[in-house]
Image (cartoon, rainbow, N blue to C red):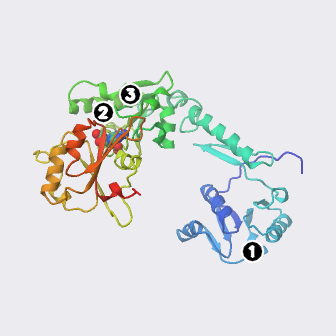
Amino acid sequence: MTSNPYPLGLRLHGRRVVVVGGGAVATRRVPALLDAGADVLLVAPELTPALRARVDAGRLHWVSRRFVPEDLDGAWLVQVAVDDPIAAASVSAVAAERRIFCVRADDRTAATAWTPAVTRHGPVTVAVLGGGDPRRAMTVRDAIRDLLAVRLAPDGTAGRPDASTGTTGGEQAGRVSLVGAGPGDPELITVKGWRLLTEADVVVADRLVPGLLLDELRPDVELVDASKIPYGPSRAQEEINQILVDRALAGAFVVRLKGGDPYVFGRGGEELLACAAAGVPVTVVPGVTSSIAAPAAAGIPVTHRGVAHEFTVVSGHLAPDAPASLVRWDALAGLHGTLVILMGLKNLAAITATLIAHGRSPQTPAAVVQEATTGTQRVLRSTLGAVAAETLAADLRPPAVVVVGDVVGALDG
Ligand code: SAH
C-alpha cells in the first residue's frame, strides 16, 4: 500500500468506538478517545489496573470476554489492541465487512486507519503521520510541540494573547497566573508553568526565582523584579498586588513567578485575593516546593518506610517566643516525624533549643541544605543539638532549608 494516507479529524463525541484488548496498548489509546468524548466499548477478558479504574469510574463500558462480531454494532471506529495476529485479523475482517475503519496496533499494513502522533494546544490539534515510522512521527511532533509552545496563545490563536484577541485591551482582556518556578534548578519548573512564562507579556519575579528562566524571556517582555520594590515588606506586597492588577486591567497577560510553590510561604493567596477583588481572572500553577525538593537534593527523603510517617513544614522566620508566632514549637517537639524548617537560619539556635527543651532528643539527625538544586548547593549534616553552631561555623546562608528527623540518615549506606 504505497499511496498517501488521507488525514481526517474524527469528531467522536457521543459516537461508539470499540477497543478490542485490555493491555498496555489499550491503556495508552483509551484516554485520547475518552478525551474526544467517544462512547468507548472495551472488549477484553482482562484489563490493566488503569483501565479498570476508568471502568470503575463509569467512564467507559467493558464486556469481559473475547470479541464477537456483534460488538461492532453501531460502531464508527475500531481499535484493535491485541497481540494475537489471528484474533486481530478476525476483528479487522469484521470491521472491513461493515466498512468500519480499523486501527491495528499489531500490523500497520493490515490496518485501514493509522493513529498519528499528536500534540494539542488549546483548540489546535496537530497530527503527524510518519509514513509508517512512528518514531519519525514522534520526533516531528515533538519539534512542532516546542514551536507551538512559544508561538501560540493559550486559546490556540497565533501570537501573544493580547495581540491576537482583536480586542482593544479592555477590562477583560488581561489576566494573571501565579506560577511556581520550583526550587532553583531552572528545569524544575512545570511544563505548564514554562509554557505560560513563554506566553507572558509581563513577568513579575521574586528574588528566589531561577535566573536562567528569566534569561530566556523574549526581549519585549516587561520584567518586574519584585525584590527591588522599595518600602517595607507589607507595603511592597501591596505594591506587587497593584502591579499585577494594573497590568492585567491594561490587557496584559501577567505571570507572577514565585520560588518553589506559590502557596508555601509565598503570599500567593494574598495576590490571588487582590486579583479576584479587582475582577482580574487569575489561575495558579503549583510548583516544586523547596520544602520537599531541598531535602531530596541532599539525598534526604521527607518520608521513608519504617522511619517517618509524617513531615511537617514550618516557617522559622519568627523566633519561638515571638508574640506573633503561630507555631506550637512545644507540640512539634513531641512529634517523631520529619520537621522541615524554612526561613529558619536566623532563629536556628532558639528553634533547636526550644525543640530540645520540649523533649526532642539533641541526638536527632539534622541537616541544612543551602541553595538546593543549584550549582552552588551546600549541605551540612549534623544533629539537632549541634546544627545551629555548625551552621554558623560553616557560614551557611539563606536560602536554606533545615531538616530534622531520622530521615536525614535514612538513605545512608
Ligand atoms: N514558596 C517557596 C518558599 C518561600 S519562603 C517554596 O515553596 O519553596 C523562602 C524560603 O524557602 C527560604 O528562606 C528557604 O528556607 C526556602 N528555599 C527556597 N528555595 C530554596 C533553595 N533552593 N534551597 C534551600 N532553601 C530554599
Instruction: Determine the residue positioned at 17% across, 48% down.
Output: 351
Q: Nearer the viewer, residue 320 or 387?
A: 387
Q: Quadrant of the C terminus?
A: bottom left
**Residue 310 percent across, percent down from the top left:** 31, 61
**Residue 53: horizontal and vertical position, in percent?**
54, 68
| Distance Cα–Cα, label 3 vs label 2 | 10 Å
Q: CA distance from mark 2 to mark 1?
A: 60 Å
Name the amino acid type tagged 1. Answer: Phe
Which amino acid type corresponds to the residue marked 3 in the rendered image? Answer: Arg
Q: Is mark 2 within 8 Å of ligand 1?
A: no
At label 2, the amino acid type is Asn
Residues at marks 1 and 3 touching, judged by CB atoms closer than 8 Å: no
Is residue 273 visible to the viewer in this orientation of the structure? no
Q: Earlier in the sequence, mark 1 or mark 3?
A: 1
Name the residue tied to disc 3: 247
Residue closest to the far bottom = 65
Say whether disc 3 or disc 2 marks the residue closer to the N-terminus.
2
Q: Is residue 247 above or below residue 406?
A: above
Q: Which residue corresponds to the image point at 11% horizontal and 44% vertical from the top-left?
A: 322
> Where 61 sits versus 403, above or below?
below
Write down the residue under mark 2.
241
Quadrant of the displayed image that contains ligand 1: top left
